Amino acid sequence: MNVIAIFDIGKTNKKLFLFDEHYKIVWERSTVCDSVLDEDGEACEDVNALREWVCQSLSELSTQAEFDVRAINFSAYGASFVHIGQDGQPVAPLYNYLKAYPEELKRKFYDTYGGEVTFSMLTASPVLGSLNSGMQLYRIKELQPELFGRIKYSLHLPQYLSYLLTGRAFSDITSIGCHTNLWNFSQGTYHEWVYREGIVDKLAPIAPSTSVVPLGAAGAGVTGDAAIPAFPGPSFPTKMPAIPIAGIGLHDSSAAIIPYLESFREPFVLISTGTWCISMNPFNDSPLTVAELQKDCLCYMSYQGKPVKASRLFAGYEHEQQVRRLADHFHKLPAYVATVDFDAELVEGLRVMDAGTEEGDTVMVGASVFGRRSLTGFVNFEQAYHRLIMDIISQQVASTQLVLAGTEVKRIFVDGGFGKNQVYMHLLADAFPDIEVFAASIPQATAMGAALAIHQHWNSRFLPGDIIELKYYK
């Protein structure tokens, strides 16, 4: 069976999938790696443990005789650099993107390069500290110059995973373009500061997201920009499938939207729901405004190199917290929420009761008004839960409207946790009566997106028409 192997690396779960030529998962493995501490005693990814797991997984894969691995690619979380030296080995920890950023250094940076508002508009990057991965390199340059001098390349995590197998160092636009502070969206090149500070010398050459690199007959790393394969000595897999080509890796958010871009040509918005609910519009290329930045809009970059305007809402986290509050008040288990069905009459009653009262917060990333409501006015869990989702939808509509404005979007797709929530989906469809609203389900969308990105290099079949399962809500 011809397959493609995809390493999908999340903050918590590390996974390896095999997809067949119809993009069905036929084999998988996963693990959880413990954190280690950086030099400041803060938790960060254990890059050595990650490398060892990749090695072990490849060795195990080599024993699966029923599969012919035609290619391999990688998706991983963003805002994370692996800094490698001349010998191809990491010279620094893989710093956590939540690591606190020195305020004085941040002020110095933005004062030097035009102020926060102007700079953020050019780079489509809200001021997020270490989440702006370019700022991690700036911190090293300013505070650890000796370390900065030892860095050959700083590779975003997806590209480091590719480098492990190929020995070839590349940068990819989906990682560069995701709130990194590195990319000037209006000019389509690195921002001026990247050149002035010498950061560009630490960044590998940019290659298209659809690029592949030959691995050689045995799958060993080949000599490339960094000169030395990244699996030296005992770390190199003792057995390895004869994989002919490898992709250069993609940022996970950009990878997750690829199945939709490949399946639909008419303009759409994807609301990817989890802890964050991220509304992504690949058909909105208008520059970010000050007002949009203040409401936490940003831009991702598609694997085709086009901006994807996005807005964020912390709704999944709020939902989790408020369900616990409801469960405590009504003496239920939090899992009881799964039994609540949508009740249109209940919604209408709440709308009549609540007419003319508070609106949601204007800052979309903030919590809805529900947290300030007293629970004593609700007769049962079901009524209170419908009110919670109504309040969240009020915020969601305002957030999604930020990326809808000025576009001819006819469909909204919702994937993730809220896509399985009937109350949420019915209320969202009701809020957008002129747009078709669908719950969308894709098994492992991020990994599938990384596979689809290099489809033409390994798969001679046409793309199947059933990779996305849709449920329409009126």
Image (spheres, rainbow, N blue to C red):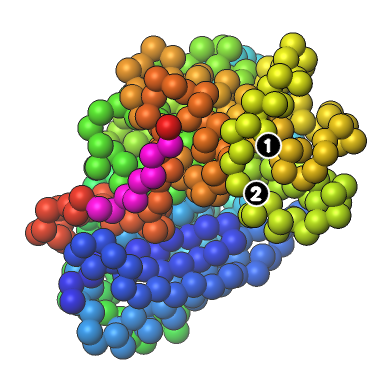
Is residue 240 one of those drawn in magenta? no
Q: Amino acid at mark 2?
A: Val
Q: Are marks 1 and 2 in contact (CB under 8 Å)?
A: yes
Expressed as whole percent of the image width and height from the top left, the position of residue 451 reads 28, 57
Expressed as whole percent of the image width and height from the top left, the position of residue 272 reads 49, 41
Q: Residue at x 51, y 12 (%)?
A: 289
Which residues fall within the magenta stretch? 466-473
What crowding class fits label 1: few (fewer than 14 Cα within 10 Å), some (14-19), or many (20 or more)? many
Expressed as whole percent of the image width and height from the top left, the position of residue 119 reads 54, 18
Magenta-highlighted stretch: main secondary structure?
strand
Q: Nearer the viewer, residue 259 or 231?
A: 259
Expressed as whole percent of the image width and height from the top left, the position of residue 452 reads 26, 52
SS label for mark 2: loop
Q: Which comes before the other along the chain, label 1 or label 2?
A: 2
Visible in this render: residue 89? Answer: yes
Residue 229 drawn above or below residue 60: above
